[in-house]
Image (tube, rainbow, N blue to C red):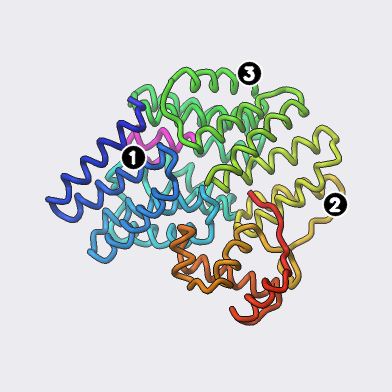
């Protein structure tokens, strides 16, 4: 019924009861608590829970639970901007599915998150046709709803108005599946995806009407829903400057949320909209989002930002050399390490994996031209700080 707090209470009771049964039921109950935590704005706690269930299910050799936990872990990592780790987890889950099959205990098949991560990582030309084939092959109408929505959004992002016919077909098919299944949660998700897709192909009246439908559902919204709602609400504006104003508000909300990937997409849209309006801020905005996207592994956003720069006559600059500025995340990790924290302690504090910390720390060493933790601590103590804003 859309009551997020009620869902959390029910999931918590379920978890308490499940402790008296087999481990598989206890772990699935823990994932249910994670889903409720996400809806109540506790995304980092939900991520940590997915990570624990993923590890426990693998240790206990529970393949179906591992698939379910891996789906949610990869999805959460991706939306929170940890695309390198999301890619690793998605690859592991995909291999597991190849061996044991993809029979979801909940609503979504693994192909959805695997395709999503690949498209964010710059493999859209290969991953989108696979996703569209997956929805064509899917016999379960319930599974099709979100898949159609994803296909519509990604086709609109890649092709814009040139892909209008395909986007309209995907949204119409998704609506038919939603009407047949009558799942309020999946139906709401589809409407928000469809509104974004329609806005991106220039059909703003249809996008506004779809957004009005979503607004009228009166269902619980998580932080990601609110960011996307603000983003799409801006994209449906006719005048570029009005769009830019709405996107600036959406970007502020996105940066205050855990959803760094969504912030990158809003930032990209803002830069492209400023370019359309002839605003001189477009160049700096697109250059900044290209650098931030490269740091996060968001290759599709980076490529689109650099394409926008080229259209403005600007040659993109790539980061990767000694002396390049640290991102906010890298500075955060550098300070914790310089204070004496181990990689594991930093990972636990920031809800990241040790491998992700290792990758960030290698970037810090390279950029600051230091060889070890001792030199890093000395460099920071000397007051050499190179910081840039990132979403």
Location of residue 243 in the rendering, given as x and y in whole percent from the top left corner:
71, 28
Q: Is residue 144 magenta?
A: yes
In the displayed structure, would residue 295 be above or below residue 225? Answer: below
Location of residue 161 in the rendering, given as x and y in whole percent from the top left corner:
68, 32
User: Which residue, given by chain and number where applicable, does mark 2 sit on?
Assistant: 314
**Relative depth, front residue between 55 and 132:** 55
In the displayed structure, would residue 330 be above or below residue 169? Answer: below
Q: Is residue 347 left or right of residue 333?
A: left
State whether residue 72 appears in this view: yes
Q: CA distance from mark 2 to mark 3?
A: 34 Å
**Relative depth, front residue between 370 and 60:** 370
Badge number at residue 376 = none
Location of residue 194 in the rendering, given as x and y in whole percent from the top left corner:
53, 29
How crowded pointer 3 is (Cα within 10 Å; few <14, some 14-19, many 20+) is rated as some
User: Which residue, given by chain and number where applicable, does mark 1 sit on?
Assistant: 107
Earlier in the chain: of badge 1 and badge 3, it is 1
**Mark 2 touching mark 1, by CB under 8 A?**
no
**Relative depth, front residue between 144 and 309:** 309
User: Which residue, given by chain and number where applicable, does mark 3 sit on?
Assistant: 205
Q: CA distance from mark 2 to mark 1?
A: 45 Å
Q: Is residue 80 magenta?
A: no
In the displayed structure, would residue 63 be above or below residue 36? Answer: below
Span colored in magenta: 136-149
Location of residue 45 in the rendering, given as x and y in whole percent from the top left corner:
40, 50
């Amino acid at each position: 019924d859309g009551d997020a707090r009620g869902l959390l209470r029910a999931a918590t009771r379920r978890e308490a009861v499940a402790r008296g049964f087999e481990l598989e039921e206890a772990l699935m109950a823990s994932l249910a608590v994670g889903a409720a935590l996400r809806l109540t704005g506790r995304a980092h706690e939900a991520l940590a829970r997915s990570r624990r269930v993923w590890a426990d299910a693998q240790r206990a050799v529970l393949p179906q639970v591992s698939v379910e936990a891996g789906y949610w872990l990869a999805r959460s990592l991706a939306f929170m901007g940890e695309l390198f780790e999301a890619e690793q987890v998605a690859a592991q889950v995909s291999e597991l599915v190849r061996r044991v099959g993809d029979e979801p205990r909940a609503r979504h098949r693994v192909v959805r998150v695997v395709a999503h991560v690949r498209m964010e990582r710059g493999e859209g030309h290969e991953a989108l046709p696979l996703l569209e084939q997956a929805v064509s092959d899917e016999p379960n109408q319930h599974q099709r709803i979100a898949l159609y929505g994803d296909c519509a959004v990604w086709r609109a992002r890649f092709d814009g108005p040139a892909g209008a016919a395909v986007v309209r077909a995907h949204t119409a098919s998704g609506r038919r599946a939603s009407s047949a299944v009558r799942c309020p949660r999946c139906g709401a998700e589809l409407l928000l995806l469809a509104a974004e897709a329609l806005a991106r192909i220039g059909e703003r009246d249809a996008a506004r009407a779809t957004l009005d439908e979503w607004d009228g559902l009166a269902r619980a919204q998580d932080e990601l829903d609110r960011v996307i709602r603000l983003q799409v609400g801006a994209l449906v504006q006719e005048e570029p400057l009005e769009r830019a104003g709405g996107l600036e508000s959406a970007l502020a909300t996105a940066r205050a949320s855990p959803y760094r990937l969504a912030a990158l997409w809003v930032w990209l849209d803002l830069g492209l909209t400023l370019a359309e309006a002839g605003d001189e801020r477009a160049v700096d905005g697109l250059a900044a989002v290209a650098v931030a996207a490269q740091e996060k592994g968001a290759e599709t956003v980076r490529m689109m930002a650099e394409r926008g720069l080229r259209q403005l006559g600007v040659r993109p600059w790539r980061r990767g050399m000694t002396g390049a500025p640290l991102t906010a995340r890298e500075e955060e990790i550098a300070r914790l390490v310089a204070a004496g924290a181990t990689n594991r302690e930093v990972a636990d504090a920031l809800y990241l994996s040790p491998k992700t910390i290792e990758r960030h720390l290698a970037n810090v060493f390279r950029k600051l031209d230091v060889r070890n933790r001792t030199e890093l601590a000395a460099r920071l103590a000397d007051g050499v700080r190179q910081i840039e804003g990132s979403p």
